[in-house]
Amino acid sequence: MDLLLSGFQAALTPENLLFATLGVLLGTAVGVLPGIGPAMTLALLLPVALTMGPDSAIIMFAGIYYGGMYGGSTTSILLNTPGESSSVVTAIEGNKMAKSGRAAQALATAAIGSFVAGTIGTVLLWVLVPTVADVVVKLGAPSYFAIMLLALFAVSAVLGSSKLRGFIALFLGLAIGLVGTTTGQARLTFDQPLLADGIDIVVVAVAIFAIGEALWVAAHLRRKPLDVIPVGQPWMSKTDWGRSWKPWLRGTAFGFPFGALPAGGAEVPTVLSYITEKKLSKHPEEFGKGAIEGVAGPEAANNASAAGTLLPLLTLGLPTTATAAIILVAITSFGIQPGPLLLENEPDLVWALLASLIVANTLLLVINLPMAPLWAKILQIPRPYLYAGILFFASLGAYTVNFQAFDVALLLVFGVLGLAMRRFGVPVLPLIVGVILGPKIEEQLTQALALSQGDVSTLWGEPVAVVVYAVMALLLVAMGVRGIRRPDAATEDTTENTEELVNR
Amino acid sequence: MSTTTEPHPASGHEPGSRPVVDKAQYGLAAFLVLTGGYVLYDAVGLEDGFADQPVQPYALPYVVGAVLLLLGVLLAVATARGDQPEAEEGEDIDLTQGTDVRTVGLLAAVLIANILLIDWLGWAITGALLFAGCAGVLGSRSHIRDLAVGTALSVGSWYFFYVVLAIPIPAGILDGVL
């Protein structure tokens, strides 16, 4: 409790409050921009944030994170083209509502639902982070090694629709993570002294998320303008409130646990929430034509899962979404060691972040509801300027890491890789997670084997490690069984689910 | 990037029809095999670690290289059997048209020019050219305005880093002017 209060003290200083406001505004503005989701927003702003103190940067990131999520739902409601997989479901009913003249109500239920879910999720984090951290701190290197393996496996195999492509992304990421001289010998450095310290993860993240995306859009730029539905002040009638509050709570209940799981993500809970609301609704006939429950539930689930992803991130150092991966990059770049000891070593930072989530969430509601018409205008920005701007800021970001033209060259190389990945449907998240966790896995393995003096059996010598390996084995078996039952899964999958339309 | 076989997302190919092979995907498979091969080749050149290194420096590279090779082969097999990638969609993406190779190539050229010139001319100049160049390639027709916006952005960002963040970005030939 004391720690939480001092966290609020840190978050509520005028300076940090300013950073939180700035973060919320920037996050929403950039999140509303078509083509830019929260992960790319964070990646683009990462180099700037790294020049501030860790406290201010993390607080601003919290604002950007929630702001970006909110901005994303605005786009999917007003444009019917979700920027990322987590808001696909919101677009189904949200855009129908907007088309039938209820854009204001759709935006309102999304914003208030996000606020409710975000608040509940953050309070759950206050309770769970210290509890889980206490347990996790006792784990040894073998258990930690096993959990990281599970995270890599889950991110590659469980999320996304093509397991082969998931693993391709993961191992490309691991290969990038090998570059450098951490083991005392130069690995994959091409005798290039500039590569001796490894490839800066900031450069990789900016390249894959920003350059890759901009090039991909450039290759397929929509030449005709999109129809943006004009919107006034968001508001809801009494019946709308009555129909929204239960979906908000149920969506939160779906979202948070899935977000907290190593392979959860936001897609499954948003789809589950949508199905549930459709079943429980008193107006099932409205579904498909713009039912408010179909916006309220998934949008709450989306935000609750965003809060949930912070649990494994802060306690284990495991990122489960692209956005969480970028936050982890930021934490690491400050020289702060993420992982089980984070809360013990940096309690002030963690609690400042946890407190600022509530601050950001409240600011979001207060600032953004009145500003919705203005945000809708941002959607009209000329596309050449939008994508030229992305390339401009990405280049600036990569250049400011070390002020070397070499980093900008790396940016282009990985940007082309990012373009190819989007062309071939290879998901981005496993690659980033591979780059981050690859070196850490090697480190934990080394530590475990050093303690046991090279005895390999130490790896399954801890009960937690055994359980984790059992879970992995179960997942493998389940995958195998499904593969046998549906040998032609590749063709079926493509038509099956809306959630698979957007591949991260 | 090939323009001959455009993937059609979310439709797949008709059951019963001859599988459409996405030939460009062989390129990705070849890239994986090459990368995996190079990782292995690099690992062979590594020496035994120190006595306190229970995990040899070449251990992980061997695993990563071998798996990359394997994945490349698997992808080639899957491609030959008619596996189609689901290209990523987005708000501004129109997948019904072919890949616009020219735009991507020109954008890459602009980015390369920035890389080559940045040390000499400095960010304040190359940034402006970068923005104007990209906007022009992407279809903006008012080149003077592009340059004006680009200059405002690059000089503005230079001063933002210098004044607000207290980080001087190397000024290049404008050293002393900015």
Image: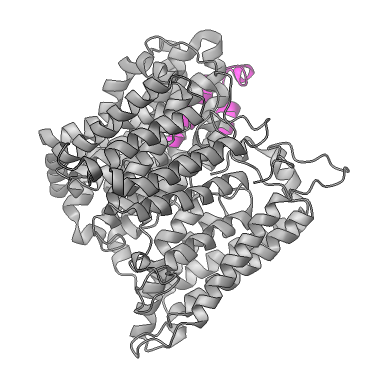
The answer to whether residue A281 is magenta is: yes
Tell me: residue A297, above or below residue A497: above
Instruction: Give coordinates of residue A202: x percent, y percent.
Output: 35, 52
Q: Residue at x 61, y 46 (%)?
A: A425
Image-quadrant location for residue A64: top left
Q: Does the magenta stretch mainly form a helix, a strand or a loop?
A: helix
Percent from the top left, x then y, of residue A1?
16, 47
Q: Range of the magenta residues?
A: A275-302
- Above/below status of A424 relative to A345: above
Front residue (pair A46, B155)? B155
Q: Residue at x 69, y 65 (%)?
A: B73
Residue A69 % position (x, y): 40, 33
Q: Nearer the viewer, residue A431 or A338?
A: A431
Q: Is residue A30 left or right of residue B21?
A: left
Report the side of A279 relative to A214 (left or right): right
Q: Quadrant of residue A379?
A: top left
